[in-house]
Image (tube, rainbow, N blue to C red):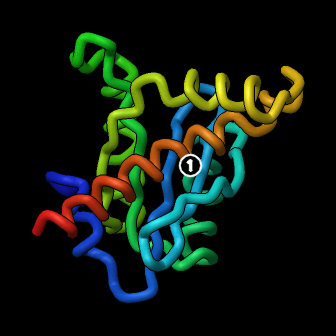
Amino acid sequence: MVVDSIQDIATALAPGQRLLGLDLGTKTIGLAVSDTGLRVASPLETIARKKFTADAERLLTLVDAETIGGLVIGLPVEMDGTEGPRCQSTRQFAANVLGLRDLPIAFWDERLSTAAVERLLITEADMTRRRRAQVVDKMAAAYILQGALDAIEAAGRNA
């Protein structure tokens, strides 16, 4: 099920379950995982995209192995706030995953996430271009997931 708000995904989780963040690209899928307290996102891995069946098989293997109770998928909204073809592709990916496994899924605005991570890796970590290419997708997934976790925590404080 696709949840209406990011707060709804936290209430859909069983105790001890975690969230998996996804940064969907055309060539790769960056993955990050939360802790069970839903406070910290950590980069997990990058899947080289092949066909949906293979991508979903790896994704669902991780869902089972990492005690994942829901997905937070970065939604590539245009800078003016509209949804273009990439958003449609992302929503279709989520629908296809739901066809295989009933998991709560939330979308999170990912505008500029990869650019922010690239900037961080250049200025703070002083990484080479080659090394950045190896980690940027899973770091972007962690950036997306952390934004969602921060919103969940803020909603809990304001409740």
Residue bearing the label numbered 1: 142
Look at 32% across and 56% down and name the residue there.
Answer: 105
Q: Is residue 90 left or right of residue 63?
A: left
Q: Nearer the viewer, residue 124 or 28?
A: 124
Q: Position of residue 55 (x, y in %)?
A: 61, 48
Q: Residue furthest top?
A: 80
- What is the three-letter code of the residue carrying label 1? Ala
Which residue is located at x 32 percent, y 68 percent? 102
Q: Secondary structure at mark 1?
A: helix
- The percent position of residue 20, horizontal first and vertical second, equals 50, 60
Q: Quadrant of residue 79?
A: top left
The vertical placement of 155 against 64, above or below, is above
Q: Residue at x 79, y 29 (%)?
A: 132
How packed mark 1 is, by other alpha carbons closer than 10 Å (few <14, some 14-19, many 20 or more), is many
Q: Is residue 36 visible?
A: yes
- Residue 125 spot, x, y in % from top left: 80, 35
Left or right? Give the position of 17 relative to 83: right
Residue placed farthest to the bottom in the image? 15
Tell whether 124 sits left or right of 14: right
Q: Which one is nearer the viewer's eye here, 37 or 78?
A: 37
Left or right: 10, with 46 as reference point = left
Q: Nearer the viewer, residue 132 or 120?
A: 120
Q: Quadrant of residue 138?
A: top right
Say whether residue 2 is visible. no
Total numbered labels placed on residues in the image: 1
Residue for point 20% across, 57% down? 3
Q: Position of residue 57 (x, y in %)?
A: 60, 59
* Quadrant location, the C terminus: bottom left
Reply above or below: 102 against 37. Answer: above
